[in-house]
Image (tube, rainbow, N blue to C red):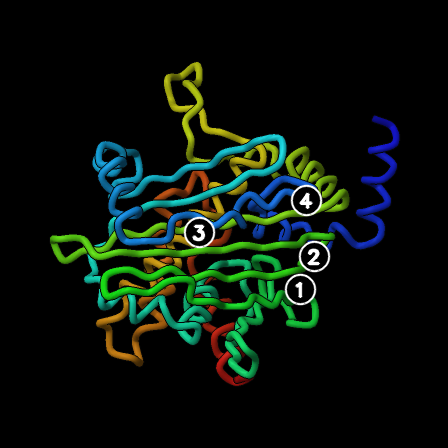
């Protein structure tokens, strides 16, 4: 235990604390080298619709006040968060919006910790260059840049799957895996599945332990683990709480982007920003980080900076 404490202290003294919020933002897999998410799942409309049928009860009866199912799982090698959700948009609109790398920067910039995003197609696969930082105004030079390769994993007339992969991140993090898939439902709506994973070594592991022991010790996720003495639900904490919070933040960014598709172009940014904040405010116990006006002002500036840079 003494050795771990010394290493933890040295990690923070050499700059780990600077990137701690970024590590918390990205947290998806708690492991040294495990890459279970990399194992190819069954990417097909049939498989996703089968999941929709299997989750029928959970989608209709849950605490989220929407057709949504959130799950996280931890093993000796990894931890993963994922969301399944029904969205009130036809598949053609969802496909056009999310099966396109150029649109993903407008999705990701909504997250409070994403400071910049640029889509480039000058390589074999499109690349999303994303700057991750803190929850307040921050120069891009102080943010951490991660390059995600974008790949269309599968596409049919009623289904698509997209993957974003990054080899490296801050604090010895590596092997980022993000995936979204969607299929058409018979009633004109769509069924989405969003999941991500991530691996890191000793520095990241110790930094996360420090976060959970200090500023993150009272934060919770969404999974109910029991009841408090006053009868209120007790929610999961620790690394599963971290991954559940950020899985929801990413999903709400996707939902906000879709919600603004029919808004006049000049009004779409404001609609997305307010929709994302309202979504997080709906789950304030888990997701509240900044005041509404502070978030809106910060994101307007960041979006403008992003447009100017491109």
Residue 136: name its quadrant.
bottom right
Q: Identify the residue at image location x=62%, y=30%.
A: 76
Point out the tag, 2 or 1, that comes first from the N-terminus. 1
The Cα atoms of the two marked residues, 4 and 2, are separated by: 16 Å
Point out the tag, 3 or 2, that comes first from the N-terminus. 2
How packed mark 2 is, by other alpha carbons closer than 10 Å (few <14, some 14-19, many 20 or more), is many
> In the depicted view, which residue is nearer to us: 103 or 167?
167
Marks counted in the figure total 4
Point out the tag, 4 or 1, that comes first from the N-terminus. 4
Q: Position of residue 205 (x, y in %)?
A: 71, 41
Residue identifier under label 2: 170
Residue identifier under label 1: 144
The Cα atoms of the two marked residues, 4 and 3, are separated by: 26 Å
Residue 116: name its quadrant.
bottom right
Q: What element carries label 1?
A: strand
How packed mark 4 is, by other alpha carbons closer than 10 Å (few <14, some 14-19, many 20 or more), is some
Residue identifier under label 3: 249
Q: Identify the residue at image location x=36%, y=68%.
A: 99
Q: Identify the residue at image location x=63%, y=42%.
A: 34
């Amino acid at each position: 235990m003494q050795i771990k404490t010394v290493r933890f202290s040295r990690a923070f003294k050499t700059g780990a604390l600077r990137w701690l919020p970024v590590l918390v933002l990205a947290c998806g897999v708690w492991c040294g080298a495990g890459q279970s998410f990399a194992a190819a799942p069954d990417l097909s409309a049939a498989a996703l619709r089968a999941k929709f049928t299997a989750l029928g009860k959970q989608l209709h009866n849950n605490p989220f006040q929407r057709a949504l199912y959130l799950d996280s799982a931890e093993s000796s090698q990894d931890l993963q968060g994922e969301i399944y959700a029904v969205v009130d948009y036809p598949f053609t609109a969802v496909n056009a919006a999310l099966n396109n790398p150029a649109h993903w920067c407008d999705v990701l910039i909504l997250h409070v910790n994403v400071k910049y995003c640029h889509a480039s197609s000058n390589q074999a696969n499109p690349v999303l260059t994303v700057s991750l930082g803190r929850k307040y105004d921050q120069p891009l030079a102080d943010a951490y840049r991660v390059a995600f390769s974008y790949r269309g994993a599968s596409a049919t007339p009623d289904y698509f799957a997209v993957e974003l992969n990054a080899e490296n991140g801050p604090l010895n993090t590596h092997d980022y895996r993000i995936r979204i898939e969607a299929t058409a439902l018979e009633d004109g709506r769509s069924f989405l599945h969003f999941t991500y994973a991530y691996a890191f070594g000793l520095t990241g592991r110790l930094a996360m332990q420090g976060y959970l022991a200090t500023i993150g010790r009272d934060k919770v996720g969404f999974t109910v683990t029991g009841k408090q003495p006053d009868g209120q639900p007790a929610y999961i904490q620790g690394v599963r709480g971290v991954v559940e919070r950020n899985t929801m933040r990413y999903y709400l960014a996707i939902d906000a982007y879709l919600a603004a598709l029919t808004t006049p172009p000049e009004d779409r940014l404001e609609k997305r920003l307010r929709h994302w904040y309202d979504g997080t405010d709906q789950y304030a116990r888990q997701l509240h980080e900044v005041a509404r006006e502070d978030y809106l002002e910060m994101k307007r500036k960041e979006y403008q900076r992003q447009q100017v840079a491109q």
